[in-house]
Amino acid sequence: MSVQLWTYIFVGITFSLYIGIAIWSKASSTSEFYVAKGTVNPLTNGMATAADWMSAASFLSMAGLISFMGYDGAVYLMGWTGGYVLLALTLAPYLRKFGKFTVPDFIGDRYYSQIARTVAVICALIVSFTYVAGQMRGVGLVFSKFLEVDIFWGVIIGMAIVFMYAVLGGMKGITYTQVAQYCVLIFAFMVPAFFISAQLTGNPIPQLGFGSKLVDGSDMYLLDKLDQLHTELGFAAYTSGTKSMQDIFFITVALMVGTAGLPHVIVRFFTVPKVKDARISVGYALIFIAILYTTAPAIAVFSRTNLITTVNEQPYDQMPEWFTTWEETALLNWVDKNGDGRITYAPGQAIVGSPEINRSNGEIVRGEYGEVTLLNPLTSTENELYVDRDIMVLANPEIAGLPNWVAALVAAGGLAAALSTAAGLLLVISTSVSHDLIKKQFNPDISDKKELLYARIAAGFAVLVAGYFGINPPGFVAEVVAIAFGLAAASFFPAIILGIFYKKMNREGAIAGMIVGLLFTLAYIGFFKLLYPEYNTPEYWWFGISPEGIGTFGMLINLVVSLAVGMIFPDPPEEVQEMVESIRYPRA
Amino acid sequence: MNNHNLKEYWAINIRYVLILISIWFVVSYGFGILLAPTLNDIQIGGFKLGFWFAQQGSIYVFVILIFVYVYLMNKLDIRFGVQEVEEGP
């Protein structure tokens, strides 16, 4: 059976499962819609959190990204897992004890101020919308690559599915679909990894495989071999990387703290019954996440090695079938600069921009050796190979010569990862509107039924907006992911931490801190990413910190401003201090 | 539960958090980043140690830290009588 047929089967089965769960778990009150009534089992919640957290980027792009970054890829691996330690130790149990529905709820009540609540709502909306657009795009991409469906229809189908279970079931529906989606995505990620690890190193456990010796008879460790290949081709050694140490440090802090401050992650810990459950639930979540996050760097090494040994200095006409298949999707392309018919792989870009296939009357124009030709201007580097980083996960099963059903599984896994994250974000958006804005600011007397209706309308509206951005992505979608983390780090995190651990923190300090941290981070990222991308190089960065890492700086500024401004103004009212006292103890 | 005891509970909690966060920092930012070039001189199996901490080891330590905290806090809750009441079926 073809990959496409298998893909239809897997996608069909998984989507029916998600819809079935949606119908079974219809929410009937706001408490059910927002936090699944706070009755989710901690293990279930851990699994749902893992799916919520791991997006299309974790599933499809991360391993590929790491394989091109080598050691530097550690910023994502540590940055996107280390935040869970902060969550378990400093946030989740206390926010659970506080026992409301959203992060702006906490900020608004703790800082006894509607302004603080509004600032928090705005942050939550910016962070979530930025993030969700990328997810819908991921859904569209998987559909177009595997099923040859238009990106437009791919996004529409994805929207329809999310609409079903997010709008009907709310948090309850989302939780149980996320559990199903976690199972799909982790199975799809691990199966190719086991096979490839066993093929290359004889050890099927990828986490051990990439530290083992190769089975090709060379008696070399895989990583030593890869370092050697890299050095021979003129790349930096795989295990040492190229970013500066302070930049690695700052990016890792920004991602960790950003993770701990992301509203769609935090809100998952409102859904368990007790403080004790919130703590252990973070632990379960991290185990489920770690399974993928410790496998990804192994896949990165396997696919990097496979790629280099397959293509470098080999004649084009001896390339395996997958090479030619992926050429036609413009994800893997070869330009014969020196006219020797062999593929030269070296540092630097091979072509200017991303590949545009040369077509005449709809037919691909082939070169001397039968290769797909491109319209792009060539660069002056020796490199003749264009490789899209997403290909590392997408093409892995084919590169390793695995059966068709494995490749189809990857498609279903990518969809599960994108849909689960999108749903979690959409819920945050709808809750922010119906609860934090309508109920808390404009119409406190609204009935529960009405509020639930508004929540559904807001969720439906958010699905449409997300879909729009999925079909017409603003050019900077990839660029703005940094904003989501930077903003979460520079705005929420200090306000929540101070709110829990510093009883005398008052509203003036917290609001000033959030606004200054937010504006500073936005300005820095906006300057380098949107306004003057030509200056986005280390020599212009402050202290060598890239826009990806600036959230850390924003967070420090937020802390300093909060404490300094806080000293000028009076202490918070007695009842607020008592509230802070009470969230510190599970029962009291 | 009197106030004095609650203060002690909170002080011990803060101490646990500080100790565990220090380990968190040393393993990820210390071993994985600042000391990584030095640790890379040590090789265990196919892994250079600094690289291993940055891409594998720190993640395992993160998981362990959370479960240690859960264990310590569950014990502490009971010692100070602030644990939540189990609801009967």
Image (spheres, grey):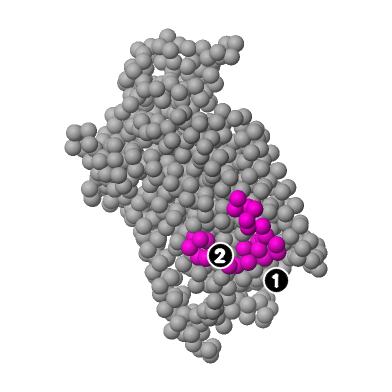
Q: Hey, which quadrant is residue A402 in on the image?
A: top left
Q: Residue A24 magenta-drawn? A: yes
* Residue type of the residue flagged with mark 1: Tyr
Is residue B80 rendered to the left or right of residue A40? Answer: left
- Would you place residue A25 above or below residue A305 in this image? below
Q: Which residue is mark 2?
A: A40
Question: Residue at horizontal 47%, vertical 85%?
Answer: B80
CA distance separating discs 2 and 1? 30 Å
Question: Residue at horizontal 70%, vertical 64%?
Answer: A29
Between circles 2 and 1, the one closer to the viewer is 2
Question: Residue at horizontal 57%, vertical 61%?
Answer: A268
Q: Are marks 2 and 1 on the same chain?
A: yes
Chain designation of label 2? A
- Would you place residue A254 above or below residue A560 in this image? above
Is residue A53 rendered to the left or right of residue A392? Answer: right
Task: List x then y, in percent, for residue A569.
Answer: 67, 73
Element at label 1: loop
Q: Which residue is mark 1?
A: A112
Q: Hey, which quadrant is residue A385 in on the image?
A: top left
**Which SS does the magenta portion mostly show?**
helix
Residue extending furthest toward the top: A368
- Would you place residue A43 above or below residue A397 in this image? below
Q: Hey, which quadrant is residue A343 in on the image?
A: top left
Q: Residue A385 magenta-drawn? A: no
Is residue A154 rendered to the left or right of residue A367? Answer: right
Chain designation of label 1? A
Task: List x then y, in percent, for residue A582.
Answer: 59, 79
